[in-house]
Amino acid sequence: MRYIFPVRERKIVSAAIAISEDRTKVLLTKRKMTQRHGGKWEFPGGKVESGESPQVGLARELREELACRSIVGRPFEVVHHSYPDFDVILIFFLVQLLDAPQCVEVAEAKWFTPGELTSADILEADLPLIRRISGEGVPSFV
């Protein structure tokens, strides 16, 4: 007897927990309505390309999406989430942005305090980290 299991695409994504200069807020970006899950808020970042480390991929994504140079710090959290047609592994890094974010490939970028996070329409995969930051506060970059 042979068993055939569906092969699901698995994406590895590096995401930034960008921390404001006063260390009281984190940055979320809103997806364009033309994108999958359009209108949802998420931590900035994106898919790690072949041959890239998650840190290099994250710095590249921040330049492409927000026209920002960045200092990618330590990993803070790893989250696995299953969507109906693919799985995603999110590696969240603490990040300092060296430039003010500009909306290049996102609909909007906004700094949120921990108390404001739960009122945003968040992408499902980011919810565990949103809950953690809402309860514990903004993590320290150092």
Image (cartoon, rainbow, N blue to C red):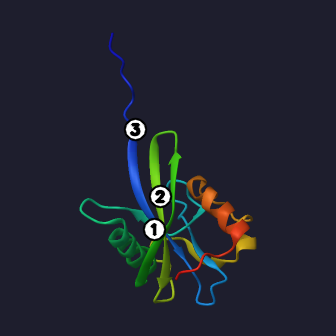
Q: Residue at x 58, y 89 (%)?
A: 21
As shown in the figure, which amino acid type bears the numbered disc 1?
Gly
Up-down relation of residue 116 to residue 89 (above or below):
below
Camera-side residue of 30 and 24: 24
**Residue 75 in the figure: left or right of residue 128:** left
Query: Which residue in the protein does label 3 denote?
Result: 8
Residue 108 place in picture, x, y as percent: 57, 74
Q: Quadrant of residue 133?
A: bottom right
As drawn, the residue found furthest toward the top would be 1
Q: Quadrant of residue 52?
A: bottom left
Q: Residue at x 67, y 83 (%)?
A: 24
As drawn, the residue found furthest toward the left would be 51
Kindly report the distance in space between the C-alpha atoms of the residues bearing marks 3 and 1.
22 Å
**Residue 70 in the figure: left or right of residue 82:** left
Camera-side residue of 65 and 44: 44
Residue 74 place in picture, x, y as percent: 45, 73
Up-down relation of residue 58 to residue 97 (above or below):
above
**Disc 2 to disc 1: CB gap under 8 Å:** yes
Q: Residue at x 36, y 18 (%)?
A: 3
As shown in the figure, which amino acid type bears the numbered disc 2?
Leu
Q: Split into 4 quadrants, where in the image is the N terminus?
A: top left
Query: Which residue in the protein does label 2 denote?
Result: 90
Q: Earlier in the sequence, mark 3 or mark 2?
A: 3
* Label disc, if present, on residue 45 of the rendered structure: 1
Crowd band around label 1 with a 10 angstrom C-alpha radius: few (<14), some (14–19), many (20+)? many
Kindly report the distance in space between the C-alpha atoms of the residues bearing marks 3 and 2.
16 Å
Q: Secondary structure at mark 3?
A: loop
Kindly report the distance in space between the C-alpha atoms of the residues bearing marks 2 and 1.
10 Å
